[in-house]
Image (tube, rainbow, N blue to C red):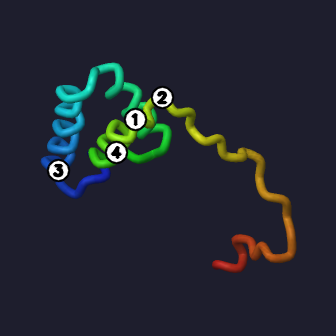
Amino acid sequence: MQERPHAEQGYRACLGILRLGKEHSHERLEKAVTRALACRSHSYRSVDSILKKRLEDQPLPQFPTEPLPPHDNVRGSSYYS
């Protein structure tokens, strides 16, 4: 709700996500919302898309957590100041 300029828009998005529970099971909705939060995608459209494509049971892609190795092409933070 903090991402919306008006609180009413956030409420409507929340109500829309809750309404998805009527056409999909509560268990599927919970899994879809968990996946959307893990992907940092908090919108109704994201949750709806996950449910329509049945992605809630698919494993999340694993991204590398180690930093990239240094090389000459990286400018660093001092370049942008």
The crowd level at tag 1 (other Cα within 10 Å; few <14, some 14-19, many 20+) is few
Secondary-structure class at tag 1: loop
Instruction: Give the image location of residue 14, x and y in percent.
Output: 21, 38
Q: Nearer the viewer, mark 1 or mark 4?
A: 1
> Which residue is the site of mark 4?
49
From the top left corner, tell me how far across and down residue 32 is, in percent.
38, 33
Tag 4 near tag 3, CB within 8 Å: no
Query: Residue at the location (85% across, 64% down)?
Result: 70
Q: Name the residue type under label 1.
A: Arg
Disc 3 and disc 1 in contact, CB within 8 angstroms: no
Real-space Cα separation, disc 2 to disc 1, in angstroms: 7 Å
Q: Which residue is mark 3?
A: 9
Q: Are marks 3 and 2 in contact (CB under 8 Å)?
A: no
**Residue 54, disc:** 1
Where, quadrant-wise, is the N terminus in this rendering?
Answer: top left
Q: Tell me the quarter of the picture where residue 11 sits.
A: top left
Crowd class of label 3 (few under 14; some 14 to 19; many from 20; radius 10 Å) = few
Disc 2 to disc 4, how far (Cα)? Answer: 13 Å
Q: Secondary structure at mark 4?
A: helix
Q: The residue under label 3 is which amino acid type?
A: Gln
> Residue at the spot x=20%, y=29% of the render?
23
Q: Are marks 2 and 1 in contact (CB under 8 Å)?
A: yes
| CA distance separating discs 1 and 4 | 8 Å
- Residue type of the residue flagged with mark 2: Asp
Report x, y in % for residue 26.
28, 21
Give the residue at mark 2. 57
